[in-house]
Image (cartoon, coloured by chain):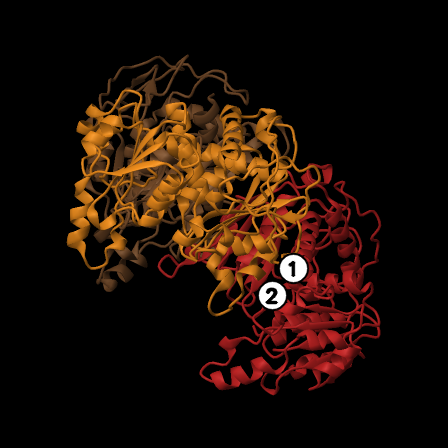
Chain colours: A brown, B orange, C red
Amino acid sequence: MAASSSLFSSSSFQGVMSFQNTKLCASYSNFVYKQPMHLKRSSQNNGTVSCRALEVDKSSSSYSVGKKFQVTDVIEAQQFDRDLLGAIFDVAREMEKIEKKSPGSQILKGYLMATLFYEPSTRTRLSFESAMRRLGGEVLTTENAREFSSAAKGETLEDTIRTVEGYSDIIVMRHFESGAAKRAAATAGIPVINAGDGPGQHPTQALLDVYTIEREIGKLDGIKVALVGDLANGRTVRSLAYLLARYNDVKIYFVSPDVVKMKNDIKDYLTSRNIQWEESADLMEVASKCDVVYQTRIQRERFGERIDLYEEARGKYIVDSRVLEVMQKHAVVMHPLPRLDEITVDVDGDSRAAYFRQAKNGLYIRMALLKLLLVGW
Amino acid sequence: MAASSSLFSSSSFQGVMSFQNTKLCASYSNFVYKQPMHLKRSSQNNGTVSCRALEVDKSSSSYSVGKKFQVTDVIEAQQFDRDLLGAIFDVAREMEKIEKKSPGSQILKGYLMATLFYEPSTRTRLSFESAMRRLGGEVLTTENAREFSSAAKGETLEDTIRTVEGYSDIIVMRHFESGAAKRAAATAGIPVINAGDGPGQHPTQALLDVYTIEREIGKLDGIKVALVGDLANGRTVRSLAYLLARYNDVKIYFVSPDVVKMKNDIKDYLTSRNIQWEESADLMEVASKCDVVYQTRIQRERFGERIDLYEEARGKYIVDSRVLEVMQKHAVVMHPLPRLDEITVDVDGDSRAAYFRQAKNGLYIRMALLKLLLVGW
Amino acid sequence: MAASSSLFSSSSFQGVMSFQNTKLCASYSNFVYKQPMHLKRSSQNNGTVSCRALEVDKSSSSYSVGKKFQVTDVIEAQQFDRDLLGAIFDVAREMEKIEKKSPGSQILKGYLMATLFYEPSTRTRLSFESAMRRLGGEVLTTENAREFSSAAKGETLEDTIRTVEGYSDIIVMRHFESGAAKRAAATAGIPVINAGDGPGQHPTQALLDVYTIEREIGKLDGIKVALVGDLANGRTVRSLAYLLARYNDVKIYFVSPDVVKMKNDIKDYLTSRNIQWEESADLMEVASKCDVVYQTRIQRERFGERIDLYEEARGKYIVDSRVLEVMQKHAVVMHPLPRLDEITVDVDGDSRAAYFRQAKNGLYIRMALLKLLLVGW
């Protein structure tokens, strides 16, 4: 399934949320939720999905093992509406305060997380494993999970999941195929977190981006965000644009070389949600107006033989000290990392350079999700 | 050493059991045992082995650190007679009941297991590491232990073991050479578990297979077992046939394509032990009579250039819904995994499909062995 | 930076020690130290370094979290003078006594160590990870850290460090480039330990070598040490020669094939420090006089196409039972491992074969350093 279609077709989204034994599809426009009392995971996947709107009740976040998290798997950014995001961010802030050897640092003691990585992503894996361990949990690492399903042996992903779920309490999966996380979640009797599935989704990155904006700017309604760089290929900016549409009075500026402009599906979606957006070729002018300048790396691998186009695109919009000069005092520069030279190193020392804090926020968001999926609110 | 010779030649088996400072060889036909009181591992290997029969006393299995396990290393399936198997299975059942954060979940706290894998086997490694962590122990992982003994550096296995034993309390080793585990055990002053050594042994797989049969069928005496698929190359079915011969009134059916028939050494051995066996080309008829249908994968790599022979062999005996139909209500389908299509996926939903439970049983068997080797009965 | 220049140029050494918010350079000849009371790491690296001599006070080593360790990163052997070495060795001896489940085994509970290995070194990694776990700490493993900075993605080491420091409390780094550890330490706001940076330094190996000599011989002043084998390329013997120069009345014998003789920089340094040294071609005669025979592997990779020279050099000085015969009763054979046949296996059984004890001492030295860097004296 292509990312563009999966991103907005609610009919294609299923099997990743469960409420009182009923698989529940998120209707993106009006998804609300509440705490299920006796949620039990269904060990079978009959392929049927029912949708209904539920009331919101998000009191009682605490370290104690509380009410069940209404999400059983984290597969797509679209699962999360603004209320749920807000509730998760509250937990993430609690996670920031947990100190070594405190009771909070042991809330996942006895739980085992399997990191099932079909392609390497050391940064993401470390972040999840650190999150698990910061909460007292343990980790089974499989950096080369491709062995499980090697061409020679030919095991299906579903069989692998059925084996691994016997050894662990939660699976964090990175896969090279779009849709793989959804298949895994449909099979597993334990929670699955998508840590990136090929060109598909990377929902925890999307959550940490929004969380970072709220932490840095103090609000999400009414903000102005510049998305800069490779807007055609970066799943990060696509997911971020989508999640920003959950907030009010947001304005988004697209600043990118012509060859990697934001695609129409996102633009159309934003329009349908009454989110203002604008394309601009003037980074300086945009930067002076925005709360957030979200820079991204131009991905060379997308240009194939056309190194000339890559070099041209790559050098066009650089965040440097001149850009900082025009930015407002409260504004921040973000980047999903790794960066090359699209943000110059002299920016690093400025307090508005938020990208390393952003990376660290990934830890808290992942701690929050692990906590919620394993022991509830 | 070839598997066929090592499997039945007691004179080739040595150095893996120790009793009161004396290396003890298992005499396969009448091996009995008891609890040694002050067993100390000998740190030297002088190559001499003495054999004697001992009395059985297997009371007092409990979580408390108890009497020493009479096995100091797990190297070959032949180490285990029916009494010892029964005692280990009792412990495995206790392991199934251990709950998170319970005292039982901490019995290996402070112990370190090194997984020294000279060839990758993520499934087996995960199972052992999960077992260790479920008991509160810690893990040092070496997925690419070949570095230790790379051609360029040329360190011997013995030197590697002497280094690793300084860092850990138990070594779980996977190696590409038959006999490597025995060499490691002869060197190490700490317990060694063989997690597969090339075409040689994979004793914990054999134990979990027998454990699964007992758990699923309720008994081991008097059962009928069909071994299906690649019986020539699969060490799993060879070891299983061997261990089944420890029980009374067992009948074994061999169902395989002609090119991968069970070899004569196993047939001769079964005959010598008065175990009934029969070859059959009719899977349906056999399945209708058996308690266990143990399916295996036809291993393509064994056929070299003869893809035609592989394809012919591979399609010949498939366990599907038609086979299920003729099977008895209490019977089960087993498979060591991974599977390709030798069991069709529509079998998975039937309660008699035991293969994923079988994989999970590997966890309990390994927990039991780790517990026994590190803290005793 | 070449090892030879970095080893003795104090002006090239900076940024790895911090005292009361001031980056402090070690003056190698007269470096002394004391406990800082409120040492805080500077999170910024302004490139300036100040030097001053400090008073010594090394009382109060204990398991309790005590006074801050005056070293914030372990980058080069030169950081350590004899007083500091002695104090660290005291802690290492305490580490030897820590028992499973004792309070001492939990002093790093809640701490996370990231092993950031840009090239594989299973032996060193295992030793560090075992050390961390023996003290109750947790580990994030990155065996293939090169991904972080792959040519395709091009992230700088500094950016990687800034990300990883968000996930962990201490970084143990192995890198293929000399100087990489120093760069990492200059960036990180958490301690960095150099676990080998290319042809540069491997300071924990140097420390464990000296610690082993003290443990085995009982003293460091007045000893006679033979350095044997590849003295031109081995960073181990170079660092050891350097550290031995901190002690009184030491005599060093160099025994090596002509093609891999000790270089002049070390000889000149020893002379400048009034350390006696002598080259000899007679291993038997030297061995009969020495307290320590430190054998090393002739590294084939240094000989390129000249296999003939390699073979000649390799066979020239072998430590075997004949060498043992002439050695004194209290003397020991050491080797940094792995060994090929430069020590014959019949030596292993002799109590003077100290090389596996030496490997184990690496565990205690690393435990001591982790303890000191994370919770102080």
Query: SS class of the residue under badge 1?
Result: helix
Crowd around label 2: few <14 · some 14–19 · many ≥20 (10 Å): some
Q: Against A140, is A29 above or below?
A: above
Are labels 1 and 2 assigned to the same chain?
Answer: yes
Question: Label 1: chain?
Answer: C
**For mark 2, what is the residue?**
C337
Describe residue B172's horizontal placement relative to residue C204 as left or right.
Answer: left
Q: Position of residue C51 (x, y in %)?
A: 73, 63
Q: Quadrant of residue A35?
A: top left
Task: Name the quadrant of the N terminus of chain C.
Answer: bottom right
Residue B226 vs C144, above or below: the answer is above
Left/right of residue B343 with respect to residue C45 in the rendered view: left
Identify residue type, mark 1: Ala
Q: Chain of mark 2?
A: C
Instruction: Describe the element under mark 2 as helix, strand or loop.
Output: loop
Camera-side residue of A297 and B332? B332
Q: Which mark is residue C359?
A: 1
Q: Is the residue under label 2 in contact with that under label 1 (CB below 8 Å)?
A: yes
C-alpha distance separating marks 1 and 2 = 8 Å
Where's residue C97, x and y in %? 75, 46
